[in-house]
Image (cartoon, helix red, strand yellow):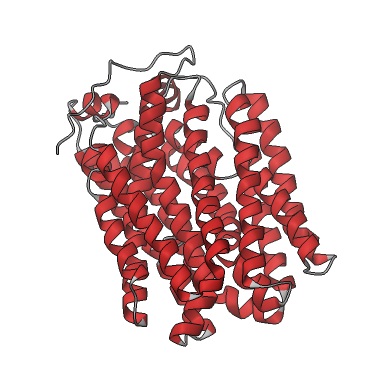
Amino acid sequence: MSTPPETETGPPGDDGTITKQQWRWTGLAGMASYLDAGSIVALGSGLAVFQEEFGLSDTGVGVLAAIGPNAIGCAIGAFVGGRLGDKLGRKRIYKWDLLVYAIGIALIALAVNPAMLFVGTVIVGVAVGADVPTSLALVGELAPNKGRARLLGFTQVSWYVGPVVVLLLAFALDPLGLLGTRIVFGSLFVVAIITWALRRGIAESARWQSASELPGNAAQRVRALFRGNHLKALLYTGTFYTFWNLAAGTAGIFTPYMVETIGAGSNAAGVALSCLGFAAGIVGTLALFMPFYDRSHGMRKGLFALGAIMQICSYGLYLVIDFTIPSVIASVLLFYVGSAVAGEATYKVTSQELFPTMLRGTAQGFTFGIARVILGVFSLVVPLLSAIGIVPVALLLTLFLLISGIVGYLAMPDTTGKSLEQIEAERADPVRAVPTAS
């Protein structure tokens, strides 16, 4: 049964009013974040189970974490999907990639040997990597000028809800072992198919349609991404996000594994603690990010500074106290509340604001992909480091969060409440400009 596409009434306004249609489309686009994070933590909660079932070494566990939705597989999808979203339109990407995602999830859920597990993990990573920058560009382009943080923050709520649902399932089904893990992945398959069907009614981005009709050389546009203010924006968003993502990705996929292997508690306890952290992230996003991030530049910087300090302290704790259940509780609360205002939601908003329409997906796909590649490499060594203890991991993650916090605060651009067109005009390079449009 075909679903007729809905139509967008025109460019969003600047008064911050968000329509029901914008909330609905944001919810459907934000399911990319749900499925991205859900697949990451599903894999994370099942790492110990897969290791035992298929006889994986610590290196094998690291490779599995590195090639999937948390890292390299996602990076490949982001590089390709982000660029294709700019060239072909947002809708052509998000129309099909969830079907590819469903195929990968099915392979993991039904895996009877390591080959099925590894191939399925790569496919899932590529699919979510293609979906995320495309879907976020759609949300940024349909949002009102004073409502971008609310709508993009709502996609971040989806990013947290996915893990909460998945981890609660994993916790409840933990006694079933491998069967429970298969059911968890099966739930993601069902959500992906339902979301794919509902997304068929979303129209193409009006801003992309207008920009795609204007003259301009695609190759020149891409080259312009690596010059002037575009390059500065890439360096800013890429550096801030990459170092933050090293900590967030490690927390997302390795917390249950480290809790069990380092000896703080069982795998079920690790799953429950991860769930607590993501729930705290939901509260932080709803209570701090969405209501206040659109208000003023000063408000953004103040909230970011608070969040950065909380995250630095979250892993710094392990340098002075033992890795126990109480210390893990304190750490995940500090990290996830802090990340609500100094983490991926900030990256999402800034990435939509700093790049013109015909480069928006390309730019975010590039920085998102680079971050995931680096995380993939780091994921190879996390199991080896955690075999020594929590201190080496905590020391590195504290350093990464310190770098992310300093760069994110000092270089944060003043874009709050401005239209995408106004931001582009203000940031246009006076020399060697190329025809682009928002």
Name the residue at 48% across, 56% down. 371
From the top left corner, tell me how far across and down residue 160 is, in percent.
Answer: 54, 46
Frontmost residue, 417 versus 228: 417
Is the residue 21 above or below the residue 58 in the image? above
Instruction: Report which quarter residue 58 is drawn in.
Output: bottom right
Q: Nearer the viewer, residue 386 or 286?
A: 286
Most foreground residue, 271 or 13: 271
Please say whether residue 358 is visible from this viewpoint.
Answer: yes
In this picture, is 408 found above or below 79?
above
Could you say where residue 242 lies in the image, as x and y percent from the top left?
A: 53, 54
Tell me what residue is drawn at x 52 percent, y 66 percent: 173
Residue 283 in percent (x, y) is at 64, 38
Q: Residue furthest right?
A: 320
Quarter of the rendering containing residue 264: bottom right
Q: Quadrant of the N terminus?
A: top left
> Is there any visible trace of residue 78 in the rendered image?
no
Query: Which quadrant: the C terminus?
Result: top left
Q: Residue at x 34, y 75 (%)?
A: 111
Counting the numbered discs, the total is 0
In the rendered structure, the answer to whether residue 308 lies left or right of residue 364 reads right
Q: Is residue 434 above or below residue 123?
A: above
Q: Is residue 40 left or right of residue 269?
A: left
Which residue is drawn at the image coordinates 50% and 81% (left, top)? 51
Name the image quarter holding residue 412: top right
Q: x%, y% of residue 351?
A: 45, 38
The answer to whether residue 390 is left or right of residue 40 is: right
